[in-house]
Amino acid sequence: MESVFVFDHPLIQHKISLLRDKNTNTKEFRELVSEIAMLMGYEVTRNMPLKEVEIETPIGIAKTNIISGKKLGIVPILRAGLGMVDGMLRLLPMAKVGHIGLYRDPETLEPVEYYCKLPVDVEEREIVVLDPMLATGGSASAAIQFIKNRGVQNIKLMCLIAAKAGIERIRKDHPDVEIYCAAVDEVLNDHAYIVPGLGDAGDRLFGTK
Ligand code: PRP
Ligand code: URA
């Protein structure tokens, strides 16, 4: 699966284990999501273009590199994607942030849109969509389609736990989109929750259940 990258770094794997633990409290959960997003962001941004510049050091002139062009845009899917924003912004403080609000209808399991606000120059940026959970893939697929409808050509999806079904859905609907995740789980339950997963990411992040 060359368009799917699963992070096997020990720090990420360790933190994912803590995140899955039902005894991890809201404060710890929030901190872990943020930390994992930052660690993953380091790799997700690996191919950002550079340009050479000359910098005057106290001793002389250094030919060195800086990131060229417009910085990334990041787009969390509300609510749970919000937990990954500050980790990414610690790496990319100048990144623009769009928001897409979607929830899964509990009956149909289809995503329902309630909010969409993207940066005005979104089509000039590479966009990383953030959502901790990729279950059926319906939410992420719809969010990616909104972003494509605005003319964006380079989109990556960053999630923490992905179900095989969700990966397949994204590969089918958006074969051009690379998926970055920290774990792949086999199955979904009857309510389309990832098993074993980590439960409801939004509720665990915000303490709403
Ligand atoms: C969760 C999660 C994803 C979606 C994944 O959001 O954060 O957005 O479900 O499921 P899917 O791949 O089957 O679409 P939820 O709908 O629970 O909303 P919330 O983040 O507001 O809690
Ligand atoms: N959304 C979640 O928060 N968790 C799941 O397991 C599936 C969808």
Image (cartoon, rainbow, N blue to C red):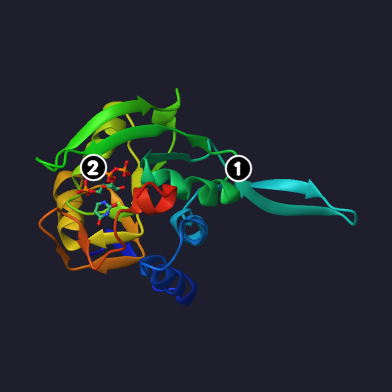
Q: Is residue 146 above or below residue 43?
A: above
Q: Residue at x 26, y 67 (%)?
A: 184
Figure quadrant of residue 102:
top left
Percent x, y of residue 69: 54, 37
Residue assigned mark 2: 139
Q: Nearer the viewer, mark 1 or mark 2?
A: 2
Percent x, y of residue 21: 37, 70
Percent x, y of residue 83: 45, 48
Task: Give the SS element for disc 1.
Answer: loop
14 or 128, which lies in front? Answer: 14
Task: Give the SS element for disc 2.
Answer: helix
Q: Tell me how far mark 1 sits from mark 2, CA to CA.
A: 26 Å
Q: Around disc 2, counting alpha carbons within 10 Å, would you say few (fewer than 14), some (14 to 19), or many (20 or more)?
A: many
Residue 78's label in the rendered image is none
Specify which label sits upstream in the sequence, 1 or 2.
Answer: 1
Amino acid residing under circle 2:
Ser
Mark 2 Cβ and ligand 1 under 8 Å apart: yes
Q: Residue at x 10, y 41 (%)?
A: 107
